[in-house]
Image (cartoon, helix red, strand yellow):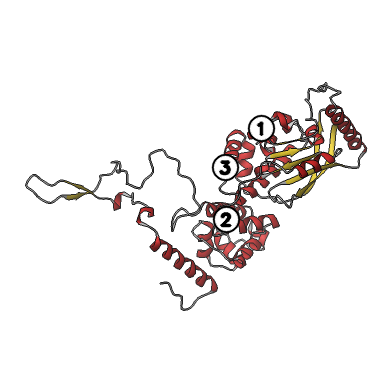
Amino acid sequence: MIRVVRGTAEDHEVAAVMAVLLALAASRPASLRPARCRAASWRRRRPGPRTGADPVEETPQRGQPLPREPNAPPAGMRVPWPIIESVGAVSRRHLVLGQFLRAKRAALSPEDVGLRETGRIRRVPGLRREEVAQLADVSVDYYTRLEQGRMTHASDAVLGSIAQALKLTRAEREYLHSCARAAFPLGASPPADTVTPETQTLLDSMARVPAVVLGRRMDVIAWNAMGAALFLDFSEVDPERRNLARMVFLEPRVRELYVDWSDAASGFVERLRMDATRYPDDPRLDDLVEELSARDPDFRRWWGRHRVQGVTSGRKRIRHPVAGELTLDWQALRITASPEQTIIVHTPAKDARTQQGFEALAAWSEAMAGGTAGSSEAGTGSPGGAGGRSGR
């Protein structure tokens, strides 16, 4: 039993967490307890001399391989991240939390937060842990354990103080709280990979507004004719690869549309980072991040910055092969009946060049939907007729 006679609220919080962990450890079946595999704790019994002496214990010499424990996984087996791997172990979410805190700490200087330089040589960029702890009014040990993933729970008040100390944005605060939650919701329903007929009817009714529906991981699950005209004919893309973030990085036809590609693409990375903490056990999201990290150095660099974005509107510049350069305002509209689905709509800016180009885009889309025109001279294909839904 852990008892704190005197101390701060923080000390009592730590004591309560430790009591829960000790109770969990005591209740775990022996078959689930981690197998010992360190050389210092392993002993092998070998037969004694032929004289009938009792067997003696032998400690393996340095460099000798250890025998496989009964509970150890087969060699080369990829062990997945569970919700909480074991008592005292670091969960995946807390590892991400520590990486995020270190990234935000490194991005700040003492001058940014009103601290005076002490003259000590800084061996790491940004703030020191003790400086963040001082600003957040928590102990250095408490903050260190939180950053190292050894803290399985932190109160909203403590997280709020740390967020203020690190000057986090609203989206970053949401990300911090999501990472710090003690457990993930179990038994969550699978993502909806198709839209309802009512949603598709709504898309098709927006005849002069490019619109696409994004699901989890920014998968494109539905679109209208103008949406296909603006980007590409999504029906021609393999459903397993019909992901807007993936196409922005790896599909040349989509990548070349963005005049300010770096700004747009880094925004996609920051929104994927938000999805990664909302759906931490999504293998397809893991595969997407792994593929983009391996194939695109910009994605790999931006992913490592741990920046997050929760914006729901903005402006983009598109260089379209038929309509020319367009300045478009976009908005994200959440579908209440399917919270994981968002309709992204694009409307033209008021400048004359965009208005003229948008009219050309609408005329081309209508002509292609009616089957009265072939591919454009610029080499683009059909915009996909009257819209469509994902085939998954």
Residue 354 pos. (x, y %): 88, 37
Residue 277 to residue 219: above or below: below
Would residue 55 appear left or right of 322 to someone viewing this image? left
Residue at 75% x, 42% y: name it: 197
Indicate left or right for 286 with 203 as reference: left
Count neighbours of disc 3 (C-alpha within 10 A) and say few if under 14, some if 14 to 19, many if 20 or more: some
Q: In this orientation, which residue lies closer to the viewer: 231 or 3?
A: 231
- Which circle's residue, 3 or 1, is located before the other in the chain? 1
**In this view, which residue lies farthest toward the right?**
352
Q: Amino acid at mark 1?
A: Leu
Q: Is residue 87 left or right of residue 358?
A: left
Q: Which residue is mark 3?
A: 286
Q: Amino acid at mark 3?
A: Asp
Name which residue lies at 66% across and 32% down.
250
For disc 2, the marked residue is 185
Mark 2 residue element: loop
Asked if marks 3 and 2 touch (Cβ < 8 Å), the reply is: no
Q: In terms of depth relative to the viewer, which is nearer, 68 or 65?
A: 68
Give the crowd class for mark 2: few <14, some 14-19, many >=20 residues within 10 Å: few
Percent coordinates x, y for residue 39 in the rendering: 30, 49
State which tag comes first along the sequence, 3 or 2.
2
Q: Position of residue 27 (x, y in %)?
A: 40, 62
Residue that mark 1 sits on:
250
**Mark 1 packing: few (<14 Cα in 10 Å), some, or many (20+)?**
some
Task: Say what amino acid the circle numbered 2 marks.
Answer: Pro
